[in-house]
Amino acid sequence: MPQSLSLVEARRVALQAQQFGGRPGAPRTVPTLTSTVRRLGLLQMDSVNVLVRAHYLPLFSRGGPYSVELLNRAAYDSRALFEYWGHEASLIPVEWQPLFRWRMQQARDGKGTWSFLRCYASGHEDLIAAVLTQIRERGPLAAGDLASGGRSSGGWWGWSQGKQIMEWLFWSGQVTTALRRNFERLYDLTERVLPPEVTAAATPPREDAQRSLMKIAAAALGVATLRDLRDYFRLPAVDGAQRLKELVEEGALVPVTVEGWKQVAYVPGRVRVPRAIESTALLSPFDSLIWERQRTERLFDFHYRIEIYTPAHKRQHGYYVLPLLWNERLAARVDLKSDRQRLRLQVRGGSVEQGIKVKQVVEPLAQQLHSMAQWLGLEGFEVTSRRGELLKALRQVRIT
């Protein structure tokens, strides 16, 4: 067991853990898809659809083109996955639902959820009962389907009272997502949606559940600091520190030093350092390889921030920018948009990182863009900006 890792070794361990070492191939069945998600721990969801919904991208990045309907079936037909707050809104293997019941109980106790939802833990009992009765009698409902659910006040978070109650019930585990309608969540009673063997499973103590989540995170990350480990499933800081201490004491996690890292890192009890990683992939801004931005900088020397909410004139790289993983480097970034009317994948911006030559990555990048366009049902990609050496070179590439 190594007591220290070079930065290159740490990258290889992390990439292998995130399923980039020897691509698993595109999933063809629900079990193979679920197996990949299980190794990753979860898929983060996000409502932005300028390219494609965020939870569809990680499987493409690791295995290439696959049917997104397969992921939909895994989540909403076979119930191999379920929606809950993992790392933000996430799709999670359904057998791990008991590991999140401590978080559900927190919500019932008026803790661990958004402040504007906490009032439903100790008030509005009649309204909550009325919403549950409607769901019980009418089946899966969107917030807008509720009778007397109230009106939205507009904006991203201007939820109606009905929507607030639905979300608190979701957070507290009393309802879950039955299906999606144009990405709108339809809620139903948890016991009617999840497999009976899951709802009947014993609820582990909070400490045991959190240790299990930390071990899942450690396996998915490969090498990680305390912050990285607890952030994966958004564990509270005090709990994460205590669970880490316990896991080290039992030998489940082993401390190591990583070249250039100020913090101690941890690896699962057994870790193999690959000789090399060969992989080319475009990564979602919400990909689990890069979502902890400080770790991304420590591991890849890659400063990355999503600029969706940044005013256009202040953006450095673009609205929806995907890093390009090229072998063991985050070597470039491109700003992408699906033009669904013209059936084109637009490349609206892009650049290579310091130390990377355009000629090294332009053809691998073009192949990824071509593959992504086909996967999205588009007829090809087009470069819509003339700025920068990378974009000029992309214009010249011909895919055969």
Image: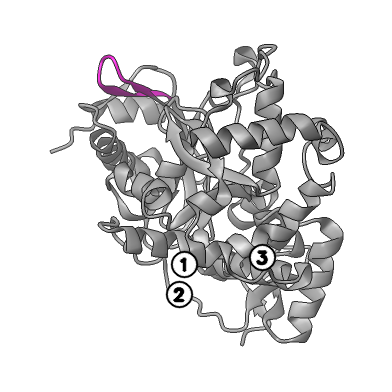
Q: Main secondary structure of the magenta part?
A: strand
Circle 1 packing at 10 Å, graded few (<14), some (14-19), many (20+), is: many
Picture quarter containing residue 210?
bottom right
**Residue under the image location 42 percent in, 69 percent down:** 276
Q: Residues within 10 Å of mark 3 (few under 14, many from 20)?
A: many
Q: Which mark, residue 16?
A: 1
Q: Residue at x 28, y 14 (%)?
A: 341
Residue at mark 2 to residue at mark 3: CA–CA distance: 17 Å
344 to the left or right of 55: left
Q: Residues within 10 Å of mark 2 (few under 14, many from 20)?
A: some
Q: Kindly identify which numbered label has been placed on residue 280.
A: none
Q: CA distance from mark 3 to mark 1?
A: 13 Å
Label 2 amino acid? Pro
Which residue is denoted by mark 2 in the rendering?
274
Residue 293 x %, y %: 66, 46
Callout 2 touching callout 3 (CB < 8 Å): no
Q: Where are the magenta residues, as a range?
A: 338-348
Label 2 element class = loop
Residue 238 location, x and y as percent?
87, 61
- Taking depth in this image into account, of 176 and 13 the one nearest to the observer is 176
Which badge, 2 or 3, is on the more N-terminal residue? 3
